[in-house]
Amino acid sequence: MLRKLMGVAALTLGLAVAAGASAQSVLNEILDGGVLKVGTTGDWVPMTQRDPATNSYKGFDIDVMTELAKDLGVTVEFVPTDWKTLVNGVVAGKYHMTGSASISPTRAKVAGFSDSYLSADMFPFTMPANADKFDGYDSINQPGVTVSTELGTTFEGFIRTWFPNAEIKVVEAPARGFQEVLAGRADVFVTSNIEGADLAERFGVVRVKNAEPRAPSPIAMLLPQADQVWINYVNNWIKVKEAGGFFAATREKWGL
């Protein structure tokens, strides 16, 4: 009898703990407050782009998060952030999740991720006037070559590893690494094929010839690491939306 009572008590305690964890989930906070707060940098075209004149956003991420908020029955609020504080904002509860970001072991130490719905490859880019100066990665990894990047991005880690002999120029948001190349203050920058296609169209940058794609990176949303209830909800939402064609249509809309 005592053993049976202890078993019942343990089960009751387990259910209470589970209920407490559920009650503390960000999901409950969102539903109770009526607002989904999403951290977004506003500088990764075509994923998220902020219009300073109207303080409004557009892009793949914006469409996805607006749809998620609609299905939750709440309002979406986009919280400005930058790459160096993107993860900290999730950890500190400044926002409930982020838009798209590369999954990396460093970020995964402190934050959770949703299931991936995109993948990106990394390439070095330069201006057409410098195209003949570079042929593959070894040609960039030389003294006298300046490679620019943004503080806190996965690109920063890549270029420090790939180009130890080059000069690394790190800028902070709202400045961008590609802007240093456009202005002639750097020779090369690294970005994904996602952003690179847009920058090639807008500014005429070109991939460094014979530089194969590197660091294939799954793209996902950043979420609070310990909140499995919220992570499960977002992952199941992604599955439903993938099955219904929403993600395919949104990727096509933004050329992804």
Image (cartoon, rainbow, N blue to C red):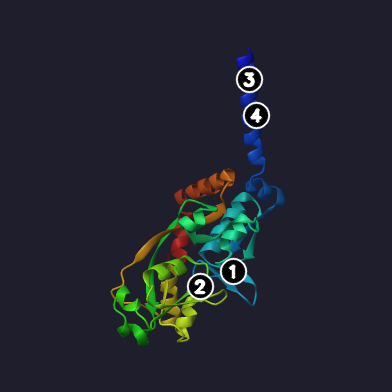
- Residue density around tag 2, few if under 14, some if 14–19, many if 20 or more, within 10 Å: many
In the image, 39 versus 163, the foreground residue is 163
The Cα atoms of the two marked residues, 2 and 4, are separated by: 48 Å
The residue carrying mark 4 is 13
The answer to whether marks 2 and 1 mark residues whose Cβ atoms lie closer than 8 Å is no
Label 1 to label 3: alpha-carbon separation: 56 Å
Numbered circle sitting on residue 57: 1
**Residue in the foreground of this view, choosing between 228 and 68:** 228
Q: Please, what secondary structure does the residue beneath circle 2 have? A: strand
| Mark closer to the chain start, 1 or 3 | 3
- Relative depth, front residue between 7 and 29: 7
Three-letter residue code for mark 2: Glu
Closer to the chain start, of discs 4 and 1, is 4
Crowding at label 1, few (<14), some or many (≥20) Cα neighbours within 10 Å? some
Does residue 118 sit above or below 138 in this rendering?
A: above
Distance in Å between CA atoms under marks 4 and 1: 46 Å
Q: Which mark is residue 6?
A: 3
Q: Amino acid at mark 1?
A: Tyr
Secondary structure of residue under mark 4: helix
